[in-house]
Amino acid sequence: MKTIEIDDELYQYIAGQTQRIGESASEILRRLLLGDAKANVTVTETEAVPAKIAVNSNIFDLLNRQDLQAESSVVGRFLFILSTLARAHKKQFHKVLEIKGRNRLYFGRTAEELSEAGSSTNPNPIPNTEFWVITNSNTTRKKMMLTETAVKLGYSEQDAERIRDLL
């Protein structure tokens, strides 16, 4: 498989041509450029995005798996996934501020806010957002945070689990 670089505007266009969740960029381009009958899929009722996701795009349209795989650490992948969710849900992403532990904030608007809410929180900025997240929790807790974030943003439980499993 070869890698090509495209600008964000073109990537958004390609992602906008998605006909089913999980359709790869190669499948979309094959369908659009070559008229490949095998790639020309129609959305069935079971493949349709649940109505409760009222957004222009979703993480599956925007996620570049090669970039995700390039992140060598769990924290790097965690921040990358959160950043992609924020990009897909700009107007709704503030809902992550509602996600909290029993005695700890997971998300905040500043590093200080998170540091004051617990010890050893190791806050990191979520790239390309105004939000911060604690990163010293274990991988299981990070997965739970991703699942809760996805649900808050309107994803089905099944898609939230798919997002969690990207970590």
Image (cartoon, grey):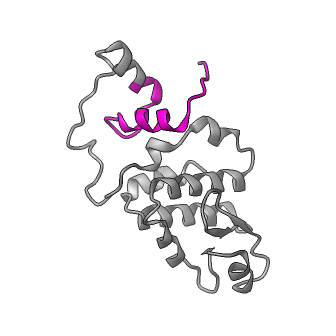
Residue at point 36% right, 58% down?
156
**Within the image, what quadrant is residue 122 found in?**
bottom right
Rendered view: 110 above or below 14: below
Nearest the viewer among 81 and 9 is 9
Nearest the viewer among 27 and 112 is 112
Quarter of the image where the N terminus is located: top right
**Position in image of residue 127 (x %, y %):** 65, 57
Residue at point 60% right, 27% down?
5
Rendered view: 120 above or below 41: below
User: Quick check: is 27 in the magenta stretch?
Assistant: yes
**Position in image of residue 28 (x %, y %):** 39, 26
Asked whether, in this view, residue 158 is left or right of residue 96, the answer is left
Residue at point 42% right, 50% down?
58
Boundaries of the magenta span: 2-28
User: Quick check: is 11 in the magenta stretch?
Assistant: yes
Asked whether, in this view, residue 132 is left or right of residue 26, the answer is right
Rendered view: 4 above or below 149: above
Asked whether, in this view, residue 130 is left or right of residue 112, the answer is left
Residue found farthest to the left:
45
